[in-house]
Amino acid sequence: MGALLSTVGTNGATIVPGLGDIPEGCVACVLLYLTPPEICNLARLNRAFRSAASADSVWEAKLPSNYQYLLDLMPPDRYQNLSKKYIFALLSRPVPFGDGNKEVWLDRITGKVCVSISAKAMAITGIDDRRYWNWIPTEESRVHTVAYLQQIWWFEVDGDVKFPFPADVYTVCFRLHMGRSSRRLGRRVCNYEHTHGWDIKPVKFELSTSDGQQASSEHCLDETERDDAYGNHKRGCWVNYKVGEFVVSGTDPTTEVRFSMKQIDCTHSKGGLCVDSVFIIPSHLKERKRKGILKQPRI
């Protein structure tokens, strides 16, 4: 079969077609089935692959249906006259909205929309009283600031976001840290001076959406058993506690998601907890260890 594809040159030598002979349109059709990192890697092969890997038709297929809305969150001069490839790269970086306390970005592997809401955008009981809460700087947060609870009896954190999520199934989780971490002599250390009360009763997590969906879960935040999946304790780690999931259909223009966590049993106090943010990500995306541990709820 390969002999049928070969030709004879002017000097009588047999010429066998190579990758460079594949039409650019055919290459572009193949790239549609690959992930963005794979497309960028194949662009190094030759001129045909490099040209096809920059085609707007290829990269527009990787962008979500609401990508124009995401662009409108930025000044027009940041994206005007950009090709679809560079628009994808631009949206793969966090785009702030909601007074800068919320961010949206595209997953670089799948192009799916991810959203985070920082503690600054949430309603936290007692946050203005420094006897209970403090805002502390840290490089371990996307927004470089987290809410640190010293001690309180009524623990309640509420938040919401209204956003045109593309059709998908989404997971909502709180990113929390038991104790307070810092850097000392170049090393990361954790202080558990104020940590108490989280092993007595579980914290209840809840979510609801504007179309009537609801989900809830409970977690004991200071359990001391080792985590089988990741081989470490909850203390000293940023942990993503799963609240639940919700579904967005293609007919929903905008979805409002409300979420909360609370432990309002006033028979005991609790403290020593950092609240960073809430993540809303497509449920099928694999959790990356750099984002922390995703704890499954006890239903």
Image (cartoon, rainbow, N blue to C red):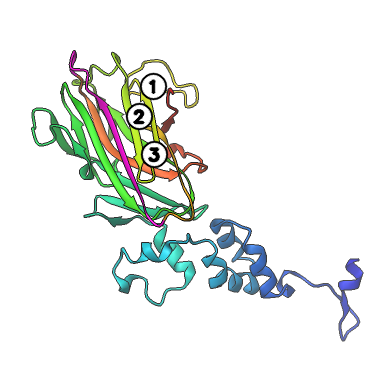
Question: Whole-Å distance between the Cαs marked 1 and 2?
Answer: 7 Å
Amino acid on which disc 3 is placed: Val
Query: Vertically, is 199 above or below 38?
Result: above
Which disc number belongs to residue 233? 1
Residue 172 is marked as 3
Lateral position of residue 57 relative to residue 255, left or right: right
Mark identifier at residue 14: none
Residue extent of the magenta highlight? 253-269
Q: Earlier in the sequence, mark 1 or mark 3?
A: 3
Residue 13 is left or right of residue 195, and the answer is right
Q: Position of residue 216 (x, y in %)?
A: 38, 30
Nearer to me, 76 or 21:
76
* In the image: residue 200, left or right of residue 47: left
Helix, strand or loop status at disc 3: strand
Answer whether labels 1 and 2 touch (C-beta < 8 Å): yes
Residue 182 visible in the snapshot? no
Query: Which tag, 3 or 2, sits closer to the chain's start?
Result: 3
